[in-house]
Amino acid sequence: MSLRILVTNDDGIYAPGLWALVAELERIAQVIVVAPDREQSAMGTSVTLRHPLRVNRVRPLLEGVEAYSVEGTPADSVILALGTLIEDGVDMVVSGINEGANLGSDVFISGTVGAAFQGHLRGLPAIALSVAAFGDLHLDTAARLAALLAGKMSAKALPPDILLNVNVPNLPPDEIKGIEITRLAPHSYTDVVEEGHDGKRKCYWIVRGQPQRNMDKGTDVWAVSSDIISILPIGSDLSTAPAPSSLKDLCSQLFHDLRSKR
Ligand code: MN
């Protein structure tokens, strides 16, 4: 087995989504896990420059998987993984499976995307993978899709440094209505500021507002709310990169493979 995949996330190294992903990718690749030691959601592309970073080799939830926790951000984890921890390198980076969607302007704050971005910056194909729900997740759908996409990437069916932000509706594979290449919705959430009190003084919470009902056809928000898997190629400047034609052709093939029994 020659394919090697770095798996990371922003929900922390023991998040169920990460290990569902590892279990599926292990069928086709050697998986190495390097991930934050605790939840680091919404850390975006943040990199730790002013503190030392500690790394621990940890007990994997799946026997035989090399796993390291990092006392840092998702981006730190990938930088350390590719810079020093993994001597022989990897062929691609997969970040997730995140609990909760990363749609529209979320890509600018998402630690899941931020981690994948570090892989992309180092010339590797990278996938950020999220399920659009909190609690009771259908991790199987996203995990299978990740393995199918990784297979296509290793078969060189996609550009070598492509960065994909993939959002999967929270449904079993046979209820997914399609897979589409999308563009970023202009907004998905409005951040709301709430006032609180910490017992001594006033404080503030930045809280997630309700997703705006942006139903413009072709956007990532539209896809997920239509029970369609959104695959969004992101450029290095975090613009929506034009989808390579190979990727468009792959979608119907991926959809077929996702729904077929193995
Ligand atoms: Mn998260």
Image: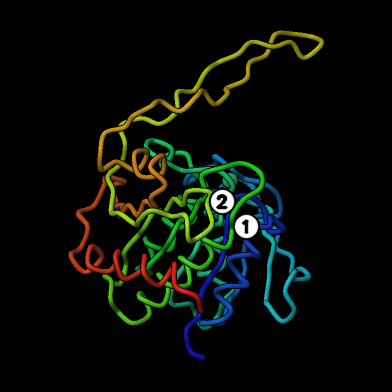
**Nearest to N terminus: mark 2 or mark 1:** 1
Question: Which residue type does callout 2 highlight?
Answer: Asn
In this rendering, is residue 190 above or below 33?
above
> For the point 52% across and 61% down, which residue is it?
141
Contact between marks 2 and 1 (CB within 8 A): the answer is yes
Q: Residue at the location (81% across, 11% down)?
A: 199
* Most foreground residue, 61 or 226: 226
Read off the residue under disc 2.
98
At label 1, which amino acid type do we have?
Answer: Gly
Quarter location, residue 123: bottom left
Q: Disc 1 designates what residue?
A: 17
- Determine the residue positioned at 41% across, 77% down: 151
Q: Position of residue 232 (x, y in %)?
A: 32, 52
The residue carrying mark 2 has its beta carbon less than 8 Å from ligand 1 = yes
Left or right of 190 in this view: 245: left
On screen, residue 43 above or below 75:
above
Q: Is residue 128 left or right of residue 135?
A: left
Q: Crowding near pointer 1: few (<14 within 10 Å), some, many (20+)?
A: many
Residue 119 is left or right of residue 138, and the answer is left
Q: Quadrant of residue 40?
A: top right
> Rounded to the nearest whole Å, what is the CA distance between mark 2 and mark 1?
6 Å
> Which percent across, then down, holds residue 72?
63, 51
